[in-house]
Image (cartoon, rainbow, N blue to C red):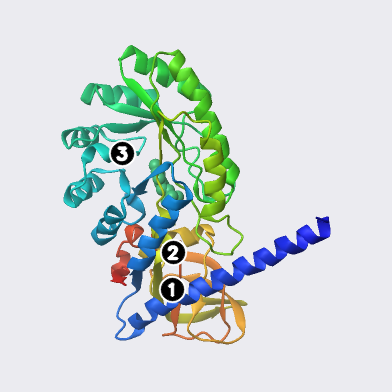
Amino acid sequence: MSQARAIQLESESKTQQRLMVQEDSRQQIAFTSAYTKDYSQPVLAMSEQRLRANARGFMAAMPRVRTHFAVKANAHADILQIFKEEGTCFEVASMAEVDAMLELGVDMETVFYSNPIKSPASVVYGAKNGIVWYSVDTPEEVTKIAAIKPDAKLYLRIEVSNEGSSWPLAGKFGASPAGVEAIIETAKSLSMQICGVTFHVGSQCSNINNWVEGINAAKVLFAKLSGHGFVPELLNIGGGYPLQFTGEEPTIQEIGAAINKELESIPDNIQVMAEPGRFLVGSAGCLVAQVVGIATRDEARWVYLDTGVYGGLLELSLEFPMNMISERTGEAGTWTIAGPTCDSIDVMGRHKLPANTEAEDFIYLPNLGAYCTTCACDFNGFPTPVMHMVD
Ligand SMILES: Cc1ncc(COP(=O)(O)O)c(C=O)c1O
């Protein structure tokens, strides 16, 4: 194929994907728009059908990979129940999430405690309630767990590239090569078992290579662990699978194809799992919010919404990709979008909305099923978005 033809095909497929994103937003708005009637506070409409389709799509894209939903993305009991019915397992980070698992009635041996830094009390709580697997990325955490649950199965979180992710997690978590050595020495001295390897490529990650490199780094570490007398049995490829905001993001099929290929050289006796959060819930949820006021400040035009950084839109303040769609049509203008509180950090950057936007217009934010309601608080007395499940 000529280079010109290849470029033409690529551009056609990108146009196609952009159109699909627009159609998807329309569908999300369709199941949310009923909530503008008798509106009193922001609503996150969550589609059960989409939750189920997302879980099925993820599992189909990576048949060898066992899916553990990252509960932090949206811990609503109805969502957990739906994923349980779809056959996913779960990953937790706190005692409250352990409680959610007890409430849900899952086999606690299938629950993974993936927060690398846990309080002693939460390790005690996890152990008391039957959790076997704990992630570690420091020698201190190994020592902590050894004192509480000496028969724990540890999985070692390594640092990997987070380049190309909208919400990087590197730096705060993940052991460096020197850190790995220290963890191995500590585990050996305390007779703790390192049974697996994990990594996180960063949330909303568009760089497939991060997973490829992570799996290859895990292979190298498996050999090292075996050399130290450990018996590796787990590869946990973490979360990070992206939503489609522009159509430029890789699809789950594309990511799955690259991961599946790398997994071919992972021996059958190694169980492989992933911890998707955003991907499973994000595109199932669409937020409807309302404009409380507009303001002209010198040259700049501002839209103030009835929810903001404190009300579930924290990610937007860090220039996270987002589609903001008004019910009003008309020529687009560039607005600075702010939340309703009196805090100056409650600002979500500049976005396009109709130039004739007015107070009381409804604004839709598709793809907000993850890290929205779970990150919201009612600072200043503004109500947090309420979640409603729709078919
Ligand atoms: C340990 C762990 N696993 C999984 C996830 C889920 O990531 P995502 O929502 O990007 O899939 C996170 C997110 O912070 C995490 O910290």
Q: Position of residue 4 (x, y in %)?
A: 82, 60
Q: Distance between the residues labelled 3 and 2?
A: 24 Å
Residue 43: image quadrant is bottom left
Q: Is mark 3 within 8 Å of ligand 1?
A: no
Q: Residue at x 59, y 63 (%)?
A: 247
Sequence-wise first label, 1 or 2: 1
Q: Name the residue under label 3.
A: 112
Q: Establish if 323 lies above or below 250.
A: below
Q: How crowded is mark 3: few (under 14 residues within 10 Å), some or many (20 or more)?
A: many
Q: Where is residue 344 in the image (x, y as percent from the top left)?
A: 45, 64
- Asked whether the residues under the numbered discs 1 and 2 touch, taking CB atoms below 8 Å apart as contact, a structural biologist would say yes
Q: Establish if 70 lies above or below 299.
A: above
Q: Establish if 138 lies above or below 16.
A: above
Q: Establish if 124 lies above or below 345.
A: above
Q: Residues within 10 Å of mark 1 (few under 14, many from 20)?
A: many
Q: SS class of the residue under badge 2?
A: helix
Q: Which residue is drawn at 50% across and 33% down?
A: 159
- Whether residue 331 is visible here, answered yes or no, is yes
Q: How far apart are marks 1 and 2 (CA)?
A: 8 Å
Q: Which residue is drawn at 40% across and 62% down?
A: 53
Q: Mark 1 points at which residue?
A: 28
Q: Is mark 1 within 8 Å of ligand 1?
A: no
Sequence-wise first label, 3 or 1: 1
Q: Mark 2 points at which residue?
A: 283
